[in-house]
Image: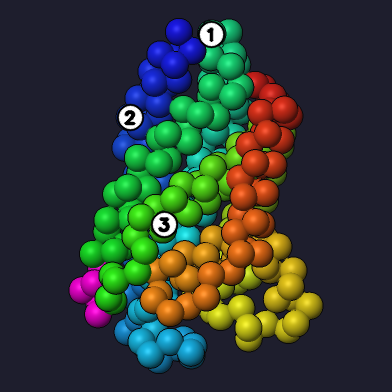
Amino acid sequence: MKARAVTAQARIEALLTVRRGESLLVTLVIPLGILVFFSSVDAVTTTYKDPVDFLVPGVLALAVMSSAMVSLGIATGYERRYGVLKRIGSTPLTRAGLLSAKTLNVLALEVVQTVLIVATGIALGWNATGGLIAAVGLLLVGTIAFAGIGMLLAGTLRAEANLAVANGLFLLLLFLGGMAYPLYKLPDALETFAKALPAAALSETLRAVLTPGVGFPTGELVVLLVWAIAAPLAAARFFRWEE
């Protein structure tokens, strides 16, 4: 019964996502725009031979963050504001079930994002020779972590505050996430702080598995796993159906 409720809710979430044009713009167009722009201009200086080799893993992490945290969190916050979640709360669907359904919807969207980003990267000269299967696993863990953060914000803050915090956090994590700018160029203290955040953990581990010969950052994997466990648990614990 619970599995059926989660599946039904996930189907509804997918239909609502398709109808939100502005959400699709954020989740599909912006990551692709960043990839194409920074691959085409001499703005990214890294130790990689081609900027696209550095950018593709970072943009994949960016896509996960924009879908699972920003779009999901903001949409859920306004559903809570308008009483939609209060009505869902009267059904057999639990808080954990709602989080699961929304995460499944995000995963479906990310499949489309990943295909488009990888295809665009290959067209720009990226060599997809790294560990794609390991990358899929990391993207899944990253999705769980960011969906947990998005749902925690949506379930505890008022809609307007949630909108501001989600967008502000997106910009902060974009800067500190090693997505379009190498972490080693940050001041030492700021780099250490950045590596404790989920954005940098996801982009750095993705970059390692997708680039042959690059050592795997075990510490960043531990950070990502901690966020993937702690954020959903906090969301399930503190999420409120109405403001």
Tag 2: amino acid: Leu
**Quadrant the C terminus occupies:** top right
> Magenta span covers which residues?
120-125
Q: Main secondary structure of the magenta part?
A: helix
Mark 3 and mark 2: Cα distance apart in space = 30 Å
Mark 1 and mark 2: Cα distance apart in space = 19 Å
What residue is pinned by disc 3? 134
Q: Position of residue 199 (x, y in %)?
A: 58, 61
Q: How is the image coloured?
A: rainbow
Residue at horizontal 44%, vertical 67%? 209
Q: Name the element at disc 3.
A: helix
Q: Position of residue 172 (x, y in %)?
A: 64, 65
Dot 1: few (<14), some (14–19), or many (≥20) neighbours within 10 Å?
few
Residue at horizontal 40%, vertical 41%? 107
Q: Which of labels 1 and 2 is toward the front?
A: 1
Q: Quadrant of residue 167?
A: bottom right
Is 123 left, or right, of 88 in this rendering? left
Q: Position of residue 80 (x, y in %)?
A: 60, 27
Q: Position of residue 170 (x, y in %)?
A: 59, 58
Is 215 left, or right, of 209 in this rendering? right
Q: Earlier in the sequence, mark 1 or mark 3?
A: 1
Q: Are marks 1 and 2 in contact (CB under 8 Å)?
A: no
Whether residue 207 is situated above or below residue 18 in the rendered picture: below
Tag 3: amino acid: Ala
What residue is pinned by disc 2? 15
Residue at horizontal 35%, vertical 32%? 14
Whether residue 4 is situated above or below residue 204 in the rendered picture: above
**Quadrant the N terminus occupies:** top left
Q: Earlier in the sequence, mark 1 or mark 2?
A: 2
Q: Which of labels 3 and 2 is toward the front?
A: 3
Q: Is residue 6 visible?
A: yes
What residue is pinned by disc 1? 91
